[in-house]
Image (cartoon, rainbow, N blue to C red):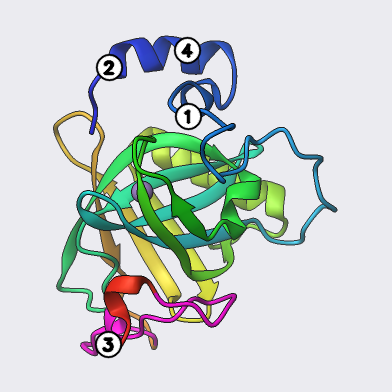
Amino acid sequence: MLGGSLLSVGYNTRMPLATYRKKRSFAKTPEPSGLEKRGAARKHPLFVVQKHDARQLHYDLRLEAEGVLKSWAVPKGPSLNPKVRRLAMKVEDHPRSYARFEGEIPEGNYGAGDVIVWDTGTYAVPDAKTARESERALMRGLKKGDAKVVLSGKKLKGGFALVRMKGRGAWLLIKERDRYASTADILKRTRSAISRRVLPRDRKK
Ligand code: MN
C-alpha cells in the first residue's frame, strides 16, 4: 500500500493532489480528477467514509482540510465501541469532489473495485466555531499525532480520536466515550448514505 511513498512525499510537497493524480489515469477511471470548481463555502468541513471493495475490502475515512480530503484506509472499518482500536493507514490526499464518488474503478486501475459512500456528513473539532477553525485544529492535531473530531454523519456520530502509532502512516481510529458509543456493529448497515446502493458483495443472495 505504501510502495513508492518516498517519491510520493516529494510530489506531495510541491503540489496538492499530485500523488492522487499520479496514481490514476482519468481517461480510464470514473473517479474525479479534482480539477472541478469549488462549491459554496460550508459552515462545517465534511467527512466521508467510503466502503471500497478493492483487492482487500476496506473503508476509507476522509476529512476535509486545506482544500483536500485527508484520507486513511481502515481495513476493518470504524467501530462505535470505545474499547476497539481500528488500524487506519494514512493514504494520499483526495480531491473534495471525491466525497460523492460511488462507482466501479475498472480492473487495471489503482484501487480497482466498487466504491459506495457508506457514510457522510460534517465534522467539528471541540471549541472550534467555524469550518476554518475546525480544519486548523484538525491539522494541528494530526501534526501532534493525536487528533479529535466530532462526526455528524448518518451512521457515525460523536467523538473519534485518530492517534498516530510508531511506523510509517499507521494510525488508530478510536471512538470516544459519549452518548453515541455503542457495542452494536455499525458495519452491519451496508447501504450507501447518499443512494440506495449496496456493494455487489453485500447484495442479498
Ligand atoms: Mn480505498
Amino acid residing under circle 1: Arg
User: Does residue 183 show up magenta in the picture?
Assistant: yes
Q: Which of the two discs, 3 and 4, labels the residue nearer the N terminus?
A: 4
* Distance between the alpha carbons at the discs numbered 4 and 2: 11 Å
**Which is closer to the viewer, label 4 or label 1?**
1
Residue lying at 52% horizontally and 40% vertically, measured from the top left:
29
Q: Which of the two discs, 4 and 2, labels the residue nearer the N terminus?
A: 2
Which residue carries the number 1 mark? 24
Which residue carries the number 2 mark? 4
Amino acid residing under circle 4: Tyr
User: Does residue 82 show up magenta in the picture?
Assistant: no
* Distance between the alpha carbons at the discs numbered 3 and 2: 38 Å
Q: Which of the two discs, 3 and 1, labels the residue nearer the N terminus?
A: 1
Quarter in which the C terminus is drawn: bottom left
Helix or strand or loop: what does disc 3 sit on?
loop
Which residue carries the number 3 mark? 182
Residue 11 marker:
4
* Magenta stretch in the rendered image: 180-198
Residue lying at 39% horizontally and 58% vertically, measured from the top left:
114
Residue lying at 41% horizontally and 77% vertically, measured from the top left:
198
Task: Spot the residue most to the right.
Answer: 40
**Which is closer to the viewer, label 1 or label 2?**
1
Q: Which of 69 and 4 is in front in this view?
A: 4
* Distance between the alpha carbons at the discs numbered 3 and 4: 41 Å
In this rendering, the answer to whether 80 lies above or below 15 is below
* Distance between the alpha carbons at the discs numbered 4 and 1: 14 Å
Q: Which of 88 and 44 is in front in this view?
A: 88
Q: Nearer the viewer, residue 87 or 99?
A: 99
